[in-house]
């Protein structure tokens, strides 16, 4: 019996994750105990889930309340007087539509660009042999470790020097490449067998052709990951937009809502308005999240293994 | 057998590989460089070059007009750094305040978020759990939202007449004016037991412009609200990392522990947790790096107030450069922060490193193996 | 592996050198104009370029008023002009100057003048104005550095006491009870304080608490700007008075009652009185049920005192069409235009020729204009802004703090920049 414990170590490495291995006899013996355990577990989880979900519910509810009601009755989830005044103000009397359009444009451009460039580079680093490949990869990894705060001032200075300040180019270009993305794609390409590519090469296809028509379609899972990450990253980006542009026409959602929070549309603490803006801002990423939920939840496994 | 061969090829250092002339691999080197060039160009221009430029600005007296490389800008050595650390004026005090605030933030957020995400992961990974997906989604959702949106939400939740205070009132208490309360929680706790001012050796000596008594004031109530927000938003991401790790742990060791009579807590602490060590490592590192750079929430919400208790070095760097036109000081603060992050990361790796097992322990294990009579 | 490491280092170093050189090359070609010496009245530039005007607006009323005025001038003069309302004026100006593309005209506060003048970003044009003799002397001196009159004051405001007439009468007070001394103010505030309302609410910053310092005879910096006077006994007395009443609950900071500023607290009747400036008229449009009355602040131990605020129209040295900008400023600071602005969003005209007309049009607000006779300006030295920010940070904990210690730290900060 005890030897089972000693052989467990080699056995564990051979097994993959086996979440369900209850010995049936044990289950029947502790039925009552496990029932109480289940109640406690569900209760605890439900309580914590309420803490996590309630803020978002109250956010949506408050955005439909009037301002005095938001101040006098903050907890309730059903407004006494249902009003869309905040949303009207947001869409008709502010630059919110402009912000939304800018965010959308920038996010789409960045996502498309990133997917393309990052997969190119990842493929090159994984499959193509050229001198200095190791150096490049080391630099990419090294760059991943530079904290963003250090880059706040200097990126502004560089954009300034290059004449790209206060333009869409300045907002999009620096975000087009992401070191983490290169890392992910390289790892992915290394994990797929090279036999298909070899075959295509023997048939005479050029390198780019092989990449574009053969390898890239095989990389769908990783590409979707990159799409999700870059959509989220650029939609939620703030500090880069602060330093790269200043005209009101180029303001994105993050910058605009941040300026709302410091009370720009008028004085006063207009919570329904601010919460409405924050809620609308969250919708696209939330939709993306729910659509790709399974993939997002499982991406972290790749991060652990990688 | 091409599958293992291809990764093996890739693993060999590039320098020892002779590029084949002609044949199916012709033009590969050129293609390789071409493919990587956008990445090099953009990373080089917008990540690498800025760091060099900022380094120069931090050593110069550029005032913000014209090019920092023009001839009227001169090299002033470490003047900016000296003024920040030993100058003794307002700048030093601001820098000390920012460091103090951020240190408390890190000290509280990192352990809390690690513990909470681990706890959630364990709960969500229980074998008998149904609706696992629902709970995981609920806990992960806040991590998806932008920091701006969450800060706006938090400003409402913790406002004076907001839901949190209403809930506290429902339980009979009186919530503080969260985002406007500048007193530190440690000081508040101490004054609750009657200690209102510190001993002389704490109040008379200072570091970076703040007396040691003020260093020990703890995070302000406003900062505490931000700490809660950080834990709320990041626990989901780290929970997923732990969930993946827990799934990878085979059940056999835990089963062995069960048979040896370990209770739930012992099983967790001695069997599960050590196997999660690499993930704990990752989570703490990511947490540290993230916490030292907190900026978005300050910019959106409190802008350093109340009473500069939510000022952080990242925000101070931005403020000094973009609002006060002290570009050299701003750049200097950014580099000192970079240094701090590196030091903390190295320190943390050193503390959590795999220590070689002492010989005494090895002998103890061997003895118990013989005693149990089972030799493999 | 040595070759590999050496290659890595070489590549990294090479990359660094190349980028640095490239940027230097870019940098040299970027700005040819050396920063002009501050104080020299160079000729104004002139071209066909349009103008950009950046303002830090207090609300829709102000933005629309300025846009209308500029549009009218633009149609008249044929020069394109665009008004931009900044979300963070200081930051956007700073970025604009660093990028070499600042707005041609912009709001410039007294606290920022010294900084921008010193690094050559501003074009002084005060002496070139056709109506330069019409401005109040105190305002001209606020915007004069080293003998150069930099920019035209666009308007000004003082702070006075605003009373909620409804709550006033409910507490049984009459016109005779309008406070004229500190003791009277305290007793009136006490009568007006009840469970939902605090007697006197104001923003917890120097820009409001400073009135008490002025009434006690104290200042932050001497009138000629050469000596720091923050730790004077008068200032300590003033802060102690405020602290006393913060503690007994008859005064309160706006933030502590859940409002963003004094005007909001007043409008929501969280406070029965507030200390605010001319802009209160525009803000109270959001609270039509509140009846406000403006009276002069009480006198302190040294007599009456209040603070005065003004912004000027700053002109960028890099602007390509300064001549047109000058004409626009003359238009915007003319008596008729300033009276129109005043009607729209409240501040008082900076030209004396408009004073009588303004008094006639705004009988309820005469107290503000009377205040200009004993008003103090805020410090204009370079770096004073940061010191005041720090002072404000400390004022937020005035209730539990030590006035002398606070003022001592402000004094040492001021000495560092004034000396």
Image (spheres, rainbow, N blue to C red):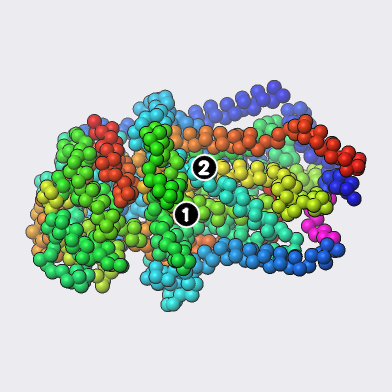
Which residue has dot 1 on it?
B225
Q: Residue at x 15, y 42 (%)?
A: C141
Q: Classify residue C219 as left or right of residue B101.
A: left
The residue stretch that appears in magenta: A14-23
Image quadrant occupied by the C terminus of chain B = top right
Q: Residue at x 85, y 60 (%)?
A: A23
Q: Classify residue C321 as left or right of residue B41.
A: left
Residue nearest the observer in this picture, C238 or A293: C238
* Chain containing the residue with disc 1: B
Q: Position of residue A302 (x, y in %)?
A: 71, 49
Check disc 2 and report its element: helix, strand or loop: loop
Residue nearest the observer in this picture, B259 or B241: B259
**Which image quadrant is residue A191 in?**
top right
Label 1 vs label 2, nearer the camera: 1
Residue A18 inside the magenta-drawn segment: yes
Which residue has dot 2 on it?
B292
Residue C358 inside the magenta-drawn segment: no
Magenta stretch, main secondary structure class: loop
């Amino acid at each position: 019996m005890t030897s089972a414990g000693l052989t467990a170590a080699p056995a564990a490495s051979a097994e993959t994750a086996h979440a369900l291995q209850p010995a049936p006899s044990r289950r029947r013996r502790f039925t009552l105990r496990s029932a109480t355990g289940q109640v406690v577990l569900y209760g605890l989880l439900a309580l914590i889930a309420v803490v996590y979900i309630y803020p978002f519910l109250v956010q949506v509810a408050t955005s439909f309340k009037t301002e005095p009601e938001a101040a006098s009755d903050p907890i309730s989830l059903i407004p006494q007087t249902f009003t869309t005044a905040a949303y009207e103000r947001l869409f008709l009397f502010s630059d919110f539509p402009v912000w939304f359009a800018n965010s959308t444009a920038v996010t789409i451009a960045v996502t498309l660009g990133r997917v393309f460039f990052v997969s190119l580079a990842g493929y090159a680093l994984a499959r193509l042999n050229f001198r200095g490949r190791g150096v490049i990869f080391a630099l990419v990894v090294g760059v991943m470790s530079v904290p963003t705060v250090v880059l706040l001032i200097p990126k502004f200075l560089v954009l300034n020097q290059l004449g790209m300040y206060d333009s869409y180019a300045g907002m999009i270009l620096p975000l087009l490449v992401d070191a983490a993305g290169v890392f992910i794609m390289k790892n992915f390409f290394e994990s797929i067998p090279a036999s298909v590519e070899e075959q295509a090469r023997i048939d005479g296809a050029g390198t780019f052709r092989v990449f574009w028509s053969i390898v890239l379609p095989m990389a769908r899972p990783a590409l979707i990951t990159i799409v999700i990450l870059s959509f989220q990253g650029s939609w939620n980006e703030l500090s880069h937009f602060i330093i790269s542009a200043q005209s009101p026409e180029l303001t994105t959602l993050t910058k605009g809502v941040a300026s709302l929070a410091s009370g720009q549309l008028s004085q006063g603490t207009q919570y329904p308005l601010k919460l409405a803006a924050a809620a609308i801002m969250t919708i696209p990423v939330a939709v993306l999240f729910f659509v790709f939920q399974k993939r997002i939840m499982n991406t972290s496994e790749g991060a652990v293994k990688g | 057998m091409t599958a293992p061969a291809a990764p093996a090829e890739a693993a060999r250092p590039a320098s020892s590989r002779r590029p084949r002339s002609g044949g199916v691999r012709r033009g590969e080197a050129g293609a390789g460089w071409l493919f990587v060039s956008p990445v090099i160009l953009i990373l080089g221009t917008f990540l690498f070059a800025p760091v060099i430029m900022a380094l120069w600005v931090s050593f110069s007296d550029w005032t913000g007009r014209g090019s920092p490389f023009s001839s009227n800008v001169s090299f002033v050595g470490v003047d900016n750094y000296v003024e920040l650390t030993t100058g003794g004026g307002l700048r030093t005090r601001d820098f000390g305040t920012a460091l103090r605030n951020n240190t408390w933030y890190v000290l509280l957020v990192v352990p809390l978020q690690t513990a909470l995400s681990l706890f959630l992961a364990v709960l969500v990974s229980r074998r008998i759990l149904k609706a696992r997906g629902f709970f995981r989604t609920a806990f992960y959702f806040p991590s998806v939202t932008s920091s701006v949106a969450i800060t706006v939400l938090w400003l409402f939740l913790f406002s004076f007449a907001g839901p949190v205070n209403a809930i506290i009132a429902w339980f009979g208490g009186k919530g503080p004016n969260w985002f406007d309360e500048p007193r530190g929680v440690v000081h508040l706790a101490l004054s609750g037991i009657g200690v209102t001012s510190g001993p002389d050796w704490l109040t008379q000596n200072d570091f970076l412009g703040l007396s040691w008594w003020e260093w020990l004031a703890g995070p302000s109530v406003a900062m505490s609200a931000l700490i809660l927000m950080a834990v709320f938003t990041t626990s989901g991401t780290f929970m997923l990392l732990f969930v993946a790790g827990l799934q990878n742990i085979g059940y056999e060791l835990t089963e062995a522990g069960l048979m040896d009579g370990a209770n739930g807590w012992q099983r967790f602490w001695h069997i599960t947790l050590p196997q999660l060590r690499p993930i704990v490592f990752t989570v703490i590192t990511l947490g540290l790096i993230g916490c030292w750079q907190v900026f978005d929430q300050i910019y959106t919400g409190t802008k350093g107030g109340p009473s500069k208790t939510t000022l952080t070095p990242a925000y101070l760097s931005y403020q000094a450069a973009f609002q006060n036109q002290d570009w050299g000081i701003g750049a200097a603060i950014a580099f000192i922060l970079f240094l701090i992050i590196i030091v903390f990361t190295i320190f943390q790796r050193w503390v959590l490193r795999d220590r070689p097992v002492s010989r005494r322990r090895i002998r103890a294990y061997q003895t118990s193996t013989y005693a149990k009579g089972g030799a493999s | 592996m040595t070759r590999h490491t050496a290659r890595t280092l070489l590549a990294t170093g090479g990359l660094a050198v190349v980028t640095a050189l490239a940027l230097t090359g870019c940098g040299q070609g970027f700005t040819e104009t050396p920063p002009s010496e501050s104080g020299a009245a160079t000729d104004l530039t002139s071209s066909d370029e349009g103008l950009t005007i950046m303002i830090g607006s207090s609300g829709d009323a102000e933005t629309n008023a300025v846009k209308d005025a500029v549009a009218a001038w633009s149609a008249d003069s044929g020069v394109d002009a665009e008004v931009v309302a900044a979300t963070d004026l200081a930051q956007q100006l700073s970025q604009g100057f660093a990028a070499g593309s600042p707005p041609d005209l912009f709001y410039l506060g007294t606290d920022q003048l010294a900084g921008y003048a010193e690094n050559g970003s501003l074009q002084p044009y005060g002496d070139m104005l056709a109506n330069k003799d019409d401005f109040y002397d105190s305002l001209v001196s606020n915007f004069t550095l080293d003998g150069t009159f930099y920019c035209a004051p666009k308007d000004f405001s003082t702070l006075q006491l605003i009373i909620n007439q409804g709550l006033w009468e409910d507490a049984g007070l009459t016109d005779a009870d309008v406070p004229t001394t500190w003791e009277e103010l305290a007793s009136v505030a006490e009568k007006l304080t009840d469970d939902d309302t605090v007697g006197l609410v104001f923003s917890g910053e120097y820009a409001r608490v400073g009135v008490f310092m002025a009434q006690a005879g104290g200042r932050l910096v001497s009138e000629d700007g050469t000596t720091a006077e923050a730790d004077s006994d008068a200032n300590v007395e003033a802060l102690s008075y405020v602290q006393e009443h913060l503690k007994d609950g008859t005064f309160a900071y706006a933030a502590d009652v859940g409002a963003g500023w004094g005007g909001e607290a007043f409008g929501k009747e969280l406070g029965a009185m507030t200390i605010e400036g001319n802009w209160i008229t525009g803000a109270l449009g959001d609270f039509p049920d509140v009846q406000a009355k403006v009276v002069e602040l009480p006198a302190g131990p040294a007599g009456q005192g209040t603070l005065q605020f003004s912004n000027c129209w700053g002109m960028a040295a890099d602007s390509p069409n300064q001549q047109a900008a000058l004409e626009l400023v003359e238009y915007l600071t003319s008596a008729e235009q300033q009276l129109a602005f005043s009607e729209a969003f409240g501040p008082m005209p900076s030209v004396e020729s408009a004073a009588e007309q303004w008094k006639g049009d705004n009988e309820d607000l005469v107290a503000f204009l009377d205040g200009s006779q004993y008003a103090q300006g805020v410090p204009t030295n370079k770096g004073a802004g940061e010191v005041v920010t720090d002072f404000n940070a400390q004022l937020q904990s005035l209730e539990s703090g030590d006035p002398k210690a606070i003022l001592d730290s402000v004094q040492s900060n001021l000495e560092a920049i004034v000396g």
